[in-house]
Image: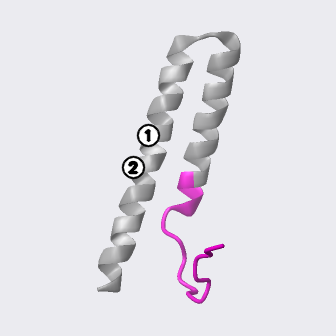
Amino acid sequence: MLRPSRDSDRPVRYLQWRIRLFGTGAILALFGIGADIEALRWAALLVLGGAAALSVMAGREEESDDT
């Protein structure tokens, strides 16, 4: 099984914000599905999309810092 290298001591960018956004999006999605409220499901989709964009942006910044 492949594992990422843990040799680096540098912090992961925006980790706390990414965790908060993914958690918030998941909770909104669960409530939206459970209560059958379409607006909550769309809000969850937007929050999760923002968290994914933040993850991509953080990954690109790390790649540009390495060079």
Q: Left or right of 38: which side holds 49?
A: left
Where disc 1 sits, the SS reads: helix
Q: Left or right of 57: which side holds 38?
A: right
Q: Quadrant of the N terminus?
A: bottom right
Asked if 49 appears above or below 60 in the picture, the reply is above
Which disc, if any, is residue 53?
2
Q: Amino acid at mark 1?
A: Gly
Residue 55 or 24: which is nearer the viewer? 55
Q: Residues within 10 Å of mark 1 (few under 14, many from 20)?
A: some
- Return the residue found at the far bottom: 7
- Is there a contact, CB below 8 Å, between mark 1 and mark 2? yes
Q: Residue at x 42, y 53 (%)?
A: 54
- Residue 37, how many percent across, how many down? 59, 11
Where disc 2 sits, the SS reads: helix
Image quadrant where residue 50 sits: top left
Q: Left or right of 3: which side holds 44?
A: left
- Residue 63, how many percent across, how many down? 35, 75
Q: Amino acid at mark 2?
A: Ala
Q: Residue at x 63, y 35 (%)?
A: 26
Q: Quadrant of the C terminus?
A: bottom left
- Return the residue found at the far front: 1
Q: Residues within 10 Å of mark 2 (few under 14, many from 20)?
A: few
Image quadrant where residue 22 sits: top right
Q: Which residue is mark 1?
A: 49
How far apart marks 1 and 2 lie (CA) works out to 6 Å
Which disc, if any, is residue 40?
none
The magenta stretch spans residue 11: yes
* Majority secondary structure of magenta residues: loop
Asked if 39 appears above or below 12 in the picture, the reply is above
- Residue 29, how many percent across, how many down? 61, 27
Q: Residue at x 44, y 32 (%)?
A: 46
Where are the magenta residues, as a range? Answer: 1-18
